[in-house]
Image: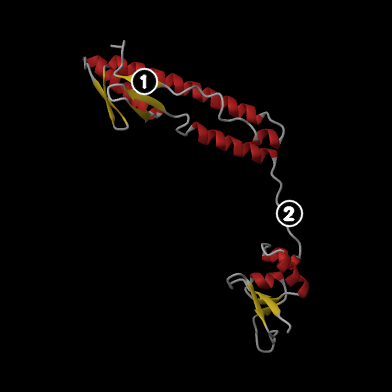
Amino acid sequence: MDRFTYIKRDIKGYYVEFNEQFDPDLYNNLGSTYNDFLNNKWVLLSQEQVAFHNEHPTASVKEVWNMEITPAPSRTLEQAKDEMIQKINEYDSSDNVNAFNVHDTEHDVTFDGWFTPEERSNYKSSIDAAKLIGVSALTFFIGDLQLEVTPTQAEYMLAQIQLYADQCFIVTKQHKISVGELETIEDVDSYPYQQGYPSKITFEYPFQGIE
């Protein structure tokens, strides 16, 4: 028995088989072109188009209509570089880079933390204010760890974090420059963007030798 395959845009899956061909005298929503399909008309596929669909079940309706698989767009060198720059930015802002450790020696517990540039600026203002009016102790929080430090200890800690952040910034900048100079997609995709960053800082708390 002959089967007739139609396509229609608002039908789930787009393809419907019938035992009989639609009679144009009975149906006023019939079409004969791909644009008719886009306009949500019933469009009958040829046997060749049905065979192509069976051979390429993942093909789009347009590819089936044209009986031709559209080649995948070529990935350019600039696109590869943009993708690698995005990876560099994501790695630079991740905990792999933006983090330091504080080891609570009294309880032998290590906490991960980070101060954003804004937080470092705010803490710096607090330190300056404490030194100006003679406050001898400041409180920092690293996760759930409460640090009681002197203004000098806090200043030392911020200085170490700032220098570490500067070094990471330089590495990130160098990676981006290096990627920009690469000449093949293969070299871009294999670029070791995670290398070169300094080791994370680990602070031993309570601080020793810094008053």
Q: Residue 182 location, x and y as percent?
A: 69, 30
Q: Nearer the viewer, residue 204 or 21?
A: 204
Tell me which amino acid carries mark 1. Phe
Q: Is residue 42 left or right of residue 120?
A: right
Color theme of the render:
secondary structure
Q: Nearer the viewer, mark 2 or mark 1?
A: 1
**Label number found at residue 195:** none
Q: Residue 16 location, x and y as percent?
A: 64, 76
Q: Residue 47 location, x and y as percent?
A: 76, 75
Q: What is the quadrant of residue 17 in the picture?
A: bottom right
Q: What is the quadrant of residue 34 in the picture?
A: bottom right
Q: Which residue is mark 2?
A: 71
Marks 2 and 1 close (CB-CB < 8 Å): no
Circle 2 SS class: loop
Please tell me whether residue 66 is drawn above or below residue 107 in the rendered image.
Answer: below
Please tell me whether residue 27 is drawn above or below residue 146 in the rendered image.
Answer: below
Tell me which amino acid carries mark 2. Pro
Image quadrant in which the N terminus is located: bottom right
Identify the mark nearer the N-term, 2 or 1: 2
Q: Residue 68 location, x and y as percent?
A: 76, 62
Total tally of numbered discs in the picture: 2
Tell me the distance, in whole angstroms, between the alpha carbons under discs 2 and 1: 55 Å
Query: Mark 2 packing: few (<14 Cα in 10 Å), some, or many (20+)?
Result: few
Query: Mark 1 packing: few (<14 Cα in 10 Å), some, or many (20+)?
Result: some
Please tell me whether residue 156 is drawn above or below residue 121 in the rendered image.
Answer: above
Circle 1 SS class: strand
Residue at image coords 65%, 84%: 28
Q: What is the quadrant of residue 44 in the picture?
A: bottom right
In the displayed image of the protein, which residue is found farthest to the right?
A: 48
**Label number found at residue 203:** 1
